[in-house]
Amino acid sequence: MQPQRSSYKKGLLFAISAYFIWGIFPLYWKMLDKIPATQILAHRIVWSFVFLAIVIFISRNRKFLQYLKNKRIMLLLTASAILIAANWGIYIYAVNSNQIVEASLGYYINPMVNIALGMIFLNEKLNRIQTLAVLFALAGLVYLTIEVGRLPVISLLLAITFGLYALVRKKANLQSMPGLLIETMILVPIALIYLWAVDYSGNGAFMHQSALTNWLLVLAGPVTAIPLFLFGIAAPKIPLSTMGFIQYFSPTIQLIIAVVVFNENFSHANLISFVLVWIGLALYSYSLLRQFRKRKIISRM
């Protein structure tokens, strides 16, 4: 019992740490707001690959070699690489164009998107509570669209790209770090060609601005990989229902940073929309908790 409790505490600590780091991401990317989002994205890909390669070399994890030999896995990782690159790029753009509130909404509705994708692609069925949760989240988006006069495009794109990424990675069923190494490896040639082109044209930021800017671009690699590493350790140690609650730390921290630190507008329409989505999330969380308790009771029988 004691080892299990210790494992749970460690998992909880790692999960909270991962989502806290993801939550304060806006503070990091905002320091690079004078640099085009495409350049930041390219550097994030390159330095993530370098950092992951070093970590995997030191840990002697050769799992990625097996993945490289499997055509099905490589096709899935190519698809997931495109999706995660799109997600990273959209998020960086959102932060540096003062749309963090909308970005946080995207990660709030992400669980609802996961439910929808599971229903469409994995033949998963929704119970009544989950159906109600999705309807509340949808109502929040519809209300915001009507009040503002436009779709919350960034919210939807972030939720959909990350939802599809999770779906593809679920299909692939791979270790987190080796999988991410190959994803960045697939993207690195394109990123390097782009960075060479912008540097050749005289518009490159790296090595042409302050030392701080250079270091921030280089450290984008560890900043990207470390929370994923922490999440990978936490996931097997704590129940899915617990992870379901913790995942809301990140968009909540982002929302607070957007409003308190960067003074982004949080209108009456935003408030009503977020409340509807939060009700949906509360229902979704309750559904997860109830499912977990049922499984626990069945396992004891």
Image: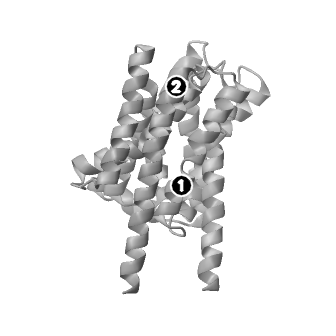
Q: CA distance from mark 2 to mark 1?
A: 22 Å
- What amino acid does circle 1 point to? Phe
Q: Quadrant of the N terminus?
A: bottom right
Please state if 102 lies on the left or on the right of 297 as rendered: right
Indicate which disc, 2 or 1, sits on the residue closer to the N terminus.
Answer: 1
The local crowd at label 2, few if under 14, some if 14 to 19, many if 20 or more residues have their Cα within 10 Å, is: many
Can the viewer see residue 96 in this picture? yes
- What amino acid does circle 2 point to? Asn
As drawn, the label of residue 91 is: none
How many dots with numbers? 2
Residue located at (58% from left, 60% from top): 57
172, above or below 276, in the image: below
The local crowd at label 1, few if under 14, some if 14 to 19, many if 20 or more residues have their Cα within 10 Å, is: some
Which residue matches tag 2? 270
Can the viewer see residue 89 in this picture? no
Please state if 45 lies on the left or on the right of 72 as rendered: right
**Front position in the image: 145 or 50:** 145
Q: Position of residue 92 (x, y in %)?
A: 56, 29
Residue located at (27% from left, 53% from top): 126
215, above or below 6, in the image: above
Residue located at (73% from left, 28% from top): 261
**Front position in the image: 292 or 174:** 292
Q: Position of residue 109 (x, y in %)?
A: 43, 39
